[in-house]
Image (cartoon, coloured by chain):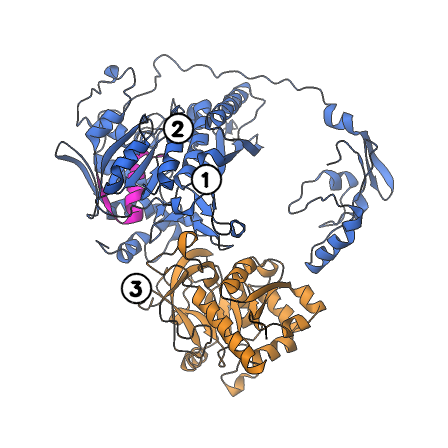
Amino acid sequence: MSMKPKALILHAAGINRDLDVAFALEAAGAEADIVHVNQLRADPSLLRRSRILVIPGGFSYADALGAGRLFALDIASFFKEEVSRFVDEGKPVIGICNGFQTLVKAGLLPGRQFFASDGDERHFTLSDNQNGRFECRWVSLKAGKSPCIWTKGIEESVVCPVAHGEGRFLASSQAHLDALIAANLVALRYTLPTGEPANEAWPYNPNGSPQDIAGICNPKGNVLGLMPHPEDNVLTGPAGRSYHGGRQGSGLSLFKNGVRHAIDQGALYG
Amino acid sequence: MASELGADVELSEVRLKYPGLAPWEIWLSEAQERMVLAVPPEKFAALTGLCESNDVEYCDLGFFTGSGRLVVRFKGKAILDLDCGFLHKGMPRRRMKAAAPAPAGDNVKPRILPGPDIPRLSELFIRVLGHHAVSSKEWAIRRYDHEVQGATKLGPFAGRDQTGPSDAAVAVPLETGLKRGVAISNGFNPRYGEADSYNAAASALDEAVRNAVAVGADPERIAVMDNFCWGDPLKPENLWTLLRAAKACKDAAVAHRTPFVSGKDSFNNEFEGPTGEKIAVPPSLLISAMGIVPELAAVRGSDLKQSDSLLYLVGEFSPLYEASVLMDILEDRPGLAAPEFSGAAPAVYRAFHKALKAGLVESCHDLSEGGLGAALAEMCMAGGLGATIDIEILETAWKDPAGMEGEGGGASIGNPARQALLLFGETNGCLVAEVDKSNANSFEQNFSGLPCVRIGMTSQESFLRVSAVGKVFASTSLEELRWAYLQESDEILDQAEPAAARVRDTNPEGR
């Protein structure tokens, strides 16, 4: 077992936060590899040899047909089995911003049908922000009660930027949304800078997601998707910064959790 | 690329976005996001491998020949075969005519002071902050990703709730080992361009350098770029303003010892007016600067940090009424003069950088559109703190221009026109610094022999006050300032909850 778990950061045309998340993961103790979709197609064992999978942010394929849509198609067409096995083994997976959109649209998040009648239909999506605009601003987040391994034990606010135009998490029905919440799968919520609920008020909740949903996980808790960019607030000291009174580098705790989980798994399974 | 060696190019290899282009169109059309690379033949396979693994299209266009001729073919047939020397140096020198525009009549003279019937100072604060040249650009800035790559140290918004404007952006490239930063700034003022293209260009360069220095860049390690946007250069008066601007670029760059590393121009920016007449854009020069920030601790931001700090004005303070935002608010006419380059600026900026590196500055902001008044208001809003400044001290800092007597201004404290000029007149070469009391002596010594005056103090109270000898001339609340500053952005954003209200509740009084 190598001390540093390998993280595979999947790259496609238009992805632009791969370096950010690679930096964050290395700061958290992983060994990060940025791997292009074509490279993974040529050598699928790259994923098998990794312990963390990251779908980073950006504008994959110019957001054609909707954000994350084509990237999701790549995953579903080329790596469906590989990725499903990775998820089923409980290995940590994180999709950030465009990566969140991709995981949802690929059917990997929340990843389980809530009602038997749903069949294979997808009931959740990330849609245009309520105000119809791309927005870049810093937000405050609180981890909710959930099985998510990435947000486990994080009590302080995570303060970091958002930069998206399609981040409003929507369900096909209120019943589906209620089921998601009842299953404790809302891993992160937007809050006021004080940590109080944002109550869907812009700009604290920047996109109008119901229930201030910023990120969700799968029932097993190993897959997290979130719109904000914790990878852009991992520095402390002179190079770091923060706003709204948040702690410098508060985004790092998520990545440390993911890396720790991968290490623990490695110790268990070798 | 082939200007000396010559090359042999095959156009039928070029990947086209759409079919039907004639060979000369393929050769000459401008296209985005394409690059030509010179690749050693033995490395070609490695390059194509890299391209294919990243879904990047490429083609093998041709080769350098060493013949000194440029040969361009389409399906083997030469469509162009020219001597490179003739192609690159064969053009006869072009002669163009520049002529100064006709002088304005004798009765059109630049004003030193605004007219006596001006609004109260507190109203001017609101109007200056609400002017489109000063007011928040949040409506535009939020729509692009200014956080991507994770290396932003200082973004476009200053302060804990991100209200005020930063002087410049600072990025910390990972390659520096997170030890050093890069400041990216600019200087631009088309109102000056219309008034005096020489001073406008010198002002733009000085502002770009000043903004970079304000965020911690070493003035000895700043490079600049120009971006000219002009009317038809074949019109002699347009060529005249262009020549004057280019001369000022040289003079100001030499004075600041900053190299021009690149640039861009756009001419013929003329549009047809309602009666068919051609209307040209004002001579508009944007100068961008990039500077190395040697120590990240020197990046202080423009937001006031604490109450009971001292406020200093450094640099040659020569507020000008003509072409200022103040004039634009009070009169409907183009300006007749623009601020002059300050000869002291290079020395002032070097000293300022020293003060930043020595940790003597809590926050700072440069003086630009809207003058000292706008700079102070922005520092207060960003920091959520108030300030009181002494306008009598400003009087002493001002280099009284000749001809004052004729304006009926006089040196009397309390003359509203004169006060308005001191607060909102525009000048080059100046910055405001917030300094902790314990650092006052060191800060003043740091500027010994250079223009530096203590103009006031920060306070816990949420008001920006202008006073002299115990009398308060203006007192404007941060709430009013924010409302004025954010109103336009809020309207454009059309939000249910105006930002002005939002900022208030995230920043409770006396934080």
Q: Quadrant of the N terminus of chain B?
A: top right
Q: How crowded is mark 2: few (under 14 residues within 10 Å), some or many (20 or more)?
A: some
Q: Residue A194 carries which label?
A: 3
Q: How crowded is mark 3: few (under 14 residues within 10 Å), some or many (20 or more)?
A: few
The chain assigned the colour blue in the figure is B
Q: Does the magenta stretch include residue B375?
A: yes
**In-front residue for pair B183/B331:** B183
Q: Is residue B328 above or below residue B25?
A: above
The chain assigned the colour orange in the figure is A
Q: In which quarter of the image is residue A132?
A: bottom left
Residue B146 visible in the displayed image = no
What span is in magenta? B369-388
Most extreme residue toward the top, as rendered? B106
Q: Residues within 10 Å of mark 1 (few under 14, many from 20)?
A: many
Q: Do the residues labelled 2 and 3 touch (CB within 8 Å)?
A: no
Name the residue rendered at 49%, 83% in the picture.
A114
Q: Residue B347 carries which label?
A: 2
Q: Which mark is residue B185?
A: 1
Q: In which quarter of the image is residue B30?
A: top right
Amino acid beneath label 3:
Thr
Q: Quadrant of the C terminus of chain B?
A: bottom left
Say which of marks 2 and 3 sits in front: 2
Residue at mark 1: chain: B
Marks 2 and 3, how far apart at CA: 45 Å
Say which of marks 2 and 1 sits in front: 2
